[in-house]
Structures are given as structure tokens and as C-alpha cells.
Image (cartoon, grey):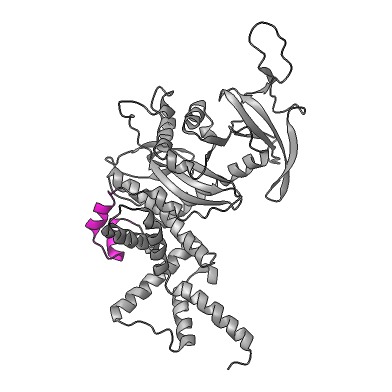
């Protein structure tokens, strides 16, 4: 019996828990995907086994993730991946199982287009799109990412990705959300993408948060038709008007509606409410009021934030807004700031899960590949939360890669480790192999 019995018991209990979570990480990934696949009621068993295989492949391959690489690392052949990638799959229902919604938290649906580099001439959807990294129009593909963001925990969960296809809307009755748009454009495509998943998205949240590109009357009107509210930011040259709240004159003619133009440099203190806001440890002054937006042709709740930039001679004020006039000023700021979490999903998917690696020229296969890449980020993060491990996506992939090598060695040599015999030594050896190269354990 050890001398320090108390310390020995704590080490054995918590050490075995950590060992249990890290000795079979791929089994945990398969279990997480199996639970999430229960939402797919019409999915066959063969497709479920394929999905578990391809998800493990995406999370373990260290190089380019394409059909040939998946066939090298997984148990299926290349043709099986090509065939199953063309099948339809309910990605929203799958990703919902990883959303840990908490009571009292403020959730919103963040949307943001992302440029995907692609070469070739026959790829569907190929065109010129705006690249935020290059700050210019580039030839390639574009996807509209849809994610659920939590304004309280600053977390984002990938929900769906829709490729931007520069095609005309099919003839026939147009959806009500785009009936007011005469010509097909990017705005009409984005509205059509939200229209296809309106019922599922409304179950998550009725607030859409997006950048300043979406602060257009056509987009806001389409969202209102679908039942969504928008939180976004205006341009610096926005035109706002004060609402007239005085008494009616009783004279003939249309009642007075506006009471002057809003001058961003000289705000009316009787209309605007001033308060302080904690912006990453720094107190900033915010001004909020309900005014009329000329560009949107409707009343909105605006929040004007004073930023001090010492490098610039003239200081500018950023104007955020919400089409829900009852929303508080702090909620508008917090929800808009949580929008940036979707950028981290794109970053991790492009660096680690092969968002730009699909070489197919089939629209269905590319849609499956885009959503698989983003869904793999949800699975990796869920694995870390389940085990209370603060691991980056890079560390998760390295851990899964080490586990795959160990599984391959054990299956090849036909031996299974006995964890009950010589526990102290074998626990140390296997844990060292699994955690080899991880930055979080250095």
C-alpha cells in the first residue's frame, strides 16, 4: 500500500479518467458521429459505416484530403467515396447534435461568404468572387457559411455551407423572399439559400448577424418575409433621420414623420441614450436610439460606438443596427461581435480539414465535401469538450493521427494491449504515444 494513500487514490482515479478518454480517441469520434447520425432516420447502414470511415479519415489525414488520400487512409476504395459524396445528407440535423444550447444565452445565426480557391475550367460555380485575404476579386469558388454563434461564450457551431452558383432562378413561381428583386444577384442567391432551410434555422434562432455588405434594403426585406431579424453594421456615410414624436397638429395632409437628419458628429442628446460598454477590458462610449434608416426604408435600433484610433487624424464612429427595435444596445454589440467566430471555422477548415481540397467537378460532391470539412470541426471540438481537453484543431488532428497509427500497428501485429496487467508502465507508454508531438502537453 502506498504511503500517501490520498494522493495515490486521486492519481489513480483522475489518471484512469484521462487515460480512458485518450487511449481510444477514434472510438469516441465514431461514437459522437453515431449519436449525431440518429437524426438521419432514412439513412442506410452502409452509408453510416461509410460516414464514420470518412469522418475519421478527414480528422487523421495530415496532407491533402481528396478521394485518393481517403482511399489510402481509410478502409473503403476510391470509388466508394466518389459515389457516396453525391448522395443527399441533412447536414443541419447532423450539426445540431453538437450545439450545446444553454438557458439564458443569446444565440444568433451568422452568415458569411468565403472564397475557395479552385483551378480548372469545368467546375460548376467557377467565377470571380471577393477574397478577403487578398482584398481583391479572384477566380475561384464561393460558399455561404451558416453558423450558430453564442454571444455569451463567443463560440460558433457550423450549421450549413451553400455554394454560390451563378445561375438563374428556375422559371415558375419565385419565392416570396426574392419576389421584390428584379434581377438575379448575390443577394437573391443568399436569400434563396436561407429560404431552403428556413424552418430548421428558425428553430435555432430568428436573428441573422452579418457584415456591412448585407445592410441592403433588398436583403432586409427578404429576411423580414422569412421571419428573421438582422443585426449588422452600416457604412460610415449612412443617412439616418430622427423620428417625430411630437403632438399632431390636426391640419390636413400627411402627419409629420421625421424631425431632422442625424449628424453623427453632433448627436441629439435628448434622443440618444449614452452608456459605457466593456470592449475587451477597455471602456468605450456607446449611443443608442431608434431612428429611420433611409437606405433600408424602415425604423431600426442603431448603436453608435466611439473608437479612438491614434494613427488617424479624423476619428470615425461605427454605426451598428438591429431591425428589432426592442433589442438592447449591449445585445446588438455582443451579437455583432460574436459574428467573427465564423471566420475561425473557415480558417480551421481551410488549414486542417480540407475545405479547399476537393477535386470533384460534380456540384453534389462538392457540396458534400464543403459541409464535411466544416462538420469535422464540430466533431473535433466536441471531442475536446467531452474530455475537458483544451486542444486546438491542429493538436486534435495530431492526436487522432497517432491513435490511427497505434490502431494500425495493433491490428497488423494481431495483439491487443492488456491494460490490467502492468498498468503503470503500459499506461505511460500508450499515453506517451498518443500525445506525442502535441503542443498542449509540452
Toward the viewer: 142 or 325? 325
Return the residue found at the far top. Answer: 252
Can residue 425 be seen at all in this image of the molecule?
Answer: yes
Q: Nearer the viewer, residue 59 or 156?
A: 156
Q: Which residues are magenta?
A: 65-87
With respect to residue 410, does 143 lie above or below? above
Q: Is residue 344 above or below residue 416?
A: above
Location of the N terminus (image quadrant): bottom right
Q: Residue 386: percent from the left, percent from the top?
A: 50, 65
Q: Residue at x 71, y 51 (%)?
A: 281
Residue 301's place in the image compared with 254, above or below, is below
Camera sees residue 209: no
Quick one: 329 or 325, which is closer to the camera? 325
- Residue at 54%, 44% in the rendered image: 108
Image x and y of residue 404, in percent: 37, 70
Residue placed at 67% from the left, 34% from the top? 316
Quadrant in the picture for the C terminus: bottom right
- Outermost left residue: 79
| Residue 76 belongs to the span the image colors magenta | yes
183 sits left or right of 442 in the view: left
Q: Quadrant of residue 28?
A: bottom left
From the top left corner, tell me how far across and down residue 152 is, in percent. 61, 50
Q: Main secondary structure of the magenta part?
A: helix
Which residue lies most toward the right here? Answer: 270
Point out residue 205 in the picture as x, y percentages from the top left corner.
52, 43
Amino acid at each position: 500500500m502506498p504511503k500517501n494513500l490520498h494522493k495515490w487514490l486521486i492519481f489513480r482515479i483522475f489518471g484512469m479518467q484521462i487515460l480512458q478518454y485518450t487511449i481510444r480517441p477514434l472510438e469516441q469520434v465514431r461514437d459522437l458521429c453515431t449519436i449525431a447520425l440518429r437524426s438521419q432516420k432514412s439513412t442506410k447502414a452502409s452509408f453510416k459505416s461509410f460516414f464514420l470511415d470518412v469522418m475519421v479519415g478527414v480528422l487523421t489525414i495530415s496532407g491533402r484530403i481528396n478521394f485518393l488520400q481517403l482511399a489510402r487512409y481509410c478502409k473503403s476504395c476510391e470509388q466508394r467515396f466518389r459515389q457516396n459524396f453525391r448522395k443527399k445528407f441533412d447536414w443541419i440535423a447532423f450539426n445540431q447534435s453538437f450545439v450545446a444550447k444553454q438557458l439564458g444565452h443569446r444565440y444568433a445565426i451568422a452568415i458569411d461568404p468565403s472564397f475557395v480557391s479552385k483551378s480548372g475550367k469545368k467546375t460548376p460555380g467557377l467565377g470571380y468572387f471577393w477574397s478577403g485575404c487578398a482584398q481583391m476579386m479572384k477566380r475561384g469558388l464561393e460558399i455561404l457559411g451558416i453558423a450558430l454563434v453564442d454571444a455569451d461564450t463567443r463560440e460558433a457551431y457550423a450549421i450549413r455551407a451553400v455554394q454560390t452558383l451563378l445561375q438563374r432562378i428556375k422559371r415558375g413561381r419565385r419565392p416570396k423572399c426574392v419576389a421584390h428583386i428584379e434581377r438575379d444577384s448575390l443577394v437573391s442567391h443568399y436569400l434563396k439559400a436561407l429560404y431552403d432551410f428556413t424552418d430548421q434555422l428558425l428553430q435555432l434562432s430568428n436573428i441573422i448577424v452579418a457584415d456591412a455588405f448585407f445592410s441592403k434594403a433588398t436583403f432586409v426585406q427578404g429576411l423580414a418575409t422569412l421571419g428573421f431579424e438582422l443585426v449588422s453594421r452600416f457604412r460610415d456615410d449612412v443617412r439616418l433621420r430622427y423620428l417625430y414624436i411630437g403632438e399632431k397638429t390636426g391640419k390636413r395632409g400627411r402627419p409629420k414623420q421625421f424631425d431632422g437628419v442625424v449628424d453623427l458628429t453632433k448627436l441629439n442628446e435628448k434622443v440618444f441614450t449614452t452608456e459605457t460598454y466593456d470592449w475587451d477590458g477597455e471602456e468605450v462610449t456607446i449611443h443608442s436610439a431608434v431612428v429611420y434608416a433611409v437606405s433600408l426604408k424602415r425604423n431600426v435600433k442603431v448603436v453608435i460606438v466611439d473608437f479612438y484610433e491614434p494613427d488617424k487624424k479624423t476619428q470615425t464612429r461605427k454605426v451598428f443596427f438591429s431591425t428589432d427595435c426592442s433589442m438592447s444596445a449591449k445585445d446588438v454589440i455582443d451579437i455583432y461581435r460574436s459574428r467573427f467566430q465564423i471566420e475561425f471555422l473557415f480558417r480551421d477548415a481551410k488549414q486542417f480539414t480540407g475545405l479547399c481540397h476537393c477535386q470533384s467537378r460534380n456540384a453534389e460532391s462538392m457540396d458534400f465535401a464543403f459541409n464535411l470539412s466544416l462538420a469535422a470541426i464540430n466533431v473535433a471540438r466536441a471531442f475536446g469538450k467531452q474530455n475537458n481537453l483544451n486542444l486546438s484543431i491542429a493538436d486534435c488532428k495530431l492526436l487522432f493521427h497517432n491513435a490511427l497509427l497505434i490502431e494500425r500497428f495493433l491490428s497488423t501485429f494481431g495483439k491487443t494491449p492488456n491494460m490490467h496487467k502492468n498498468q503503470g508502465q503500459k499506461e505511460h507508454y500508450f499515453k506517451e504515444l498518443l500525445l506525442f508531438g502535441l503542443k498542449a502537453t509540452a
